[in-house]
Every structure is written in structure tokens, then in C-alpha cells.
Image (cartoon, rainbow, N blue to C red):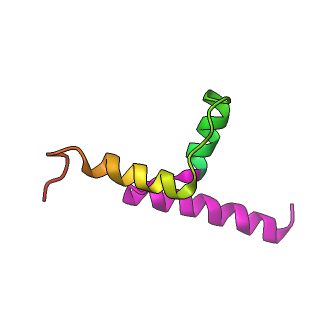
């Protein structure tokens, strides 16, 4: 593995960690889950995934403090 390849892997992991910390959805993890557990399902596009994640986050009354 080249030094650049290692850097790319580290940056992807850092990005995934940052998304988990701030509560942002992780599209790559979603795709991985769909491929493994639901192979016959057509995955959502990145835009559809983002809209769905926002809807799930804000449609639950009382799930936020403010």
C-alpha cells in the first residue's frame, strides 16, 4: 500500500468518525448494509438517502431538546 493510499484510508475513516460524532448519516455504511443484508433491494440515491435521514430525524416530536 502506498503512502497516498494509506492517507486516503485514514481520511475516509476520519470522515466517517466525524459524521458519527455529529449525527450525520453515513451513505457508504448504508450502501454496505444494503449490499450485505438486502442484496435484492435497489439502494436509495445519495439525495434520497439524505432526504430520508432528515425526515427520520425531524418527524419524531419530542426527540430534540429545543
> How many badges with numbers are in the image?
0
What is the residue that sits farthest to the right in this orientation?
1
Residue 25 lies, in percent from the top left, at: 46, 53
* Left or right side of 11 for 20: left
| Residue pictured at 58% horizontal, 46% vertical | 29
| Residue pictured at 51% horizontal, 58% vertical | 47
32, above or below 19, in the image: above
Magenta stretch contains residue 40: no
Q: Dividing the image into 4 quarters, which one contains the N terminus? A: bottom right
Residue 41 lies, in percent from the top left, at: 62, 33
Q: Main secondary structure of the magenta part?
A: helix
* Left or right side of 36 for 6: right
Q: Which residues are magenta?
A: 1-27
7, above or below 49, in the image: below
| Residue pictured at 56% horizontal, 46% vertical | 44
Residue 3 lies, in percent from the top left, at: 82, 70
* Left or right side of 58 for 38: right
Give the camera-side residue of 35 and 2. 35
Residue 30 lies, in percent from the top left, at: 56, 44
| Residue pictured at 47% horizontal, 62% vertical | 18
What is the residue that sits farthest to the bottom in this orientation?
4
Q: Dividing the image into 4 quarters, which one contains the C terminus? A: bottom left
52, above or below 17, in the image: above
Magenta stretch contains residue 21: yes
Amino acid at each position: 500500500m502506498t503512502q497516498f493510499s494509506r492517507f486516503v484510508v485514514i481520511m475516509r475513516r476520519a470522515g466517517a468518525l466525524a459524521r458519527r460524532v455529529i449525527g450525520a448519516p453515513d451513505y457508504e455504511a448504508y450502501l454496505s448494509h444494503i449490499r450485505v443484508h438486502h442484496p435484492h433491494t435497489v439502494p436509495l440515491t445519495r439525495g434520497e438517502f439524505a432526504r430520508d435521514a432528515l425526515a427520520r430525524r425531524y418527524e419524531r416530536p419530542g426527540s430534540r431538546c429545543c
